[in-house]
Amino acid sequence: MKSIFYPILLACLMLCSFVHAENADYSRDEAYKGPHSTTVSADQKLLYLVQFDAAKIAQIDTNDGKVLKELTIPETPTWAVLWQNDAKLLVTTAPQGKVHCVDIASGNIDWTIPVGYCPESIVVHPNGKIAYVANRFSTDVSVIDLEAKKELKRVPMLHEPISVDVTPDGKTIFVSNYLPIDPADGYDVAAEVTWMDTETFETGQIRLLNGCVSLHELSISDDGKYAFVTNNLARYQMPTTQLERGWMNTNAVAIIDVPGRKLINVVLLDDIDLGASNPWGVKMTPDGKSLIVAHAGTHEISVIDAPAMFEKLTKIAAADQETDAQGQKSNYGYSSASSADVPNDLAFLVGMRTRIKLTGNGPRTVALANGKAFIPMYFSDTVSVVDLATKKEVQSITLNPEFKLSDARLGYRVFNDGEACFQQWQSCASCHPYTRPDGLNWDLMNDGLGNPKNAKSLLLSHETPPTMISGIRADAEACVRSGFKHILFSVRPESEMLCIDEYLKTMKPLPSPALVNGELSEQAVRGKEIFYRVNCQQCHDPEWYYTDMQMHDVNTENPFDRRRDFDCPTLCEVWRTAPYLHDGRYPTLFQLFKDGLHGVQKGAVDKLTDDEIRDLCEYVRSL
């Protein structure tokens, strides 16, 4: 039965994913608006709100919060920026990357430029002639000539470039790379920020601190001195035995010296006994007095006294060579003794930060206008408006009066909800962003302590049991429930667990960036022949998501492991799940085959030339 039924089912699923582009990142549920990102007119009278699910951009009056008009956008909009004296909008859409120039008055699309795969952010050079687009899954930045209406070049980035901003003088762009590119079994694993000279296209990297992953919005201050990028600061080297005081995950903003192109420090946004999970949007007020951070997991914003924060950082840095046992004394009491202590200091912002609870669920970016902060609330189809002088929410703009959560949408919301966790330190999405892996090894309690393993993608987890790399959970249902109990340390209603099950079942693979017009490239066709020649299909069964769902000993045991055999993972979307093996020791597929000789037990992988390995990698990347 399997030989007849499985190929038919798999073909149908693959056809669905290619034709409709349904996936965890860019599929839309048209029952919702999905407010996602924002931009504000120069006179601060109008807010333009990207509605991810509705595929529209709403024009909103910043004075009274009324929606004045909606502009329809083809495909899934991800970001928008104003252009030509605020008469036009440049809108990125995904997954097939495009930039659309939308005439605001008529609502018509003037022109469209193809860019990289899955663009997530766009910014316009101060001269108004050039735009830069962060293409997440083609791992590059598109440089666009807006006058000639063409892409000039692509500049390679590191790993999932997701947010881009340009300095006020136009000389440099900064790009946040969402995930690290390091081996997960190393001591230091961190994502990086890339800077690029806009004249020479020279690039360089600013490495964040060990454990900094899931970088979201990057924003440069109006004076050009600082760049801020939100991130999770994971304590992945600790066993997952508790949550108190950020034992597993803390939440932070990294501060970058823009002229010096270097990291100043990483400041925690949590309180000692209350996390501020999944920071997303960040923006400094034009006067430099306040830094605003949106917390997607806890449905709030932080308003930080920026001058006081910088003063404290400066004093601590100056005292690095001369501290006492109690630490550096400031107006805010004893705190970090040195700059190295700051990323571990849950009391660093005491006296300098106000947490403001918002109406709605799932804040994303931050827009500033007329002394107010406008925050799109993705999971409630609302926009929260906060008066920054009084530090109070003054309005919640309703976008979808008929709003009603489906089971899958509720599951999606709970998966990302830090309030579902003890003390709000993290959500399911903290270790499985967009349901995929975070690139880190975690020492979970389910198979004994002291044997960390790489986080797995949850894509197809219901279709490919057992779950966990050690196969310790019988199926995805058991995995979801034990995750809340033993990782989030909370008890939630079974109805919510069923909704998360439903949400995860809706996930579809994103077509690979290695495909050419939806088909295998010539190199991948050669790689497919090699795939079968060295018998990869014996474990990675093409009839069922490229896995046989069995445990295998492929000679990858490390000194910390307590078993030699591990679950055979699906190869669907393997192009986005680096690093590889159960302990993430290989950052690339080429290293997996060349250095790790993966699969040599079944075929002559050790006899392949480097070119043949590259062909094999290209095929596997195409799945």
Image: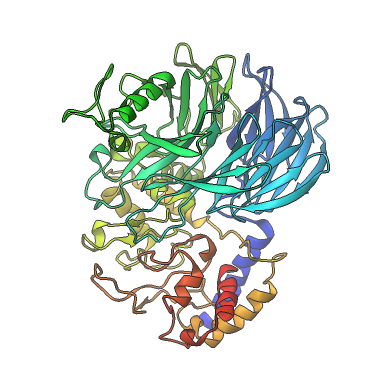
Residue 551, above or below 269: below
Quarter-of-image position of residue 50: top right
Residue toward you, 263 or 412: 263
Residue 258, above or below 248: above
Q: Is residue 463 left or right of residue 16?
A: left
Q: Is residue 74 visible?
A: no
Q: Residue at x 73, y 39 (%)?
A: 130
**x, y (%) of residue 365?**
54, 32
Residue toward you, 537 or 303: 303
Q: Residue furthest left?
A: 325
**x, y (%) of residue 173?**
61, 39
User: Which quadrant holds the C terminus?
Assistant: bottom right
Q: Is residue 610 left or right of residue 188?
A: right
Residue toward you, 239 or 181: 181
Q: Is residue 295 left or right of residue 106?
A: left
Q: Residue at x 47, y 24 (%)?
A: 291
Quarter-of-image position of residue 37: top right
Residue 43, above or below 610: above
**x, y (%) of residue 388?**
49, 15
Q: Is residue 361 visible?
A: yes
Q: Residue at x 51, y 72 (%)?
A: 590
> How many circles with numbers are drawn on the protein?
0
Q: Residue furthest front?
A: 321
Q: Is residue 612 left or right of residue 462?
A: right
Q: Residue at x 56, y 77 (%)?
A: 616
**x, y (%) of residue 91?**
70, 39
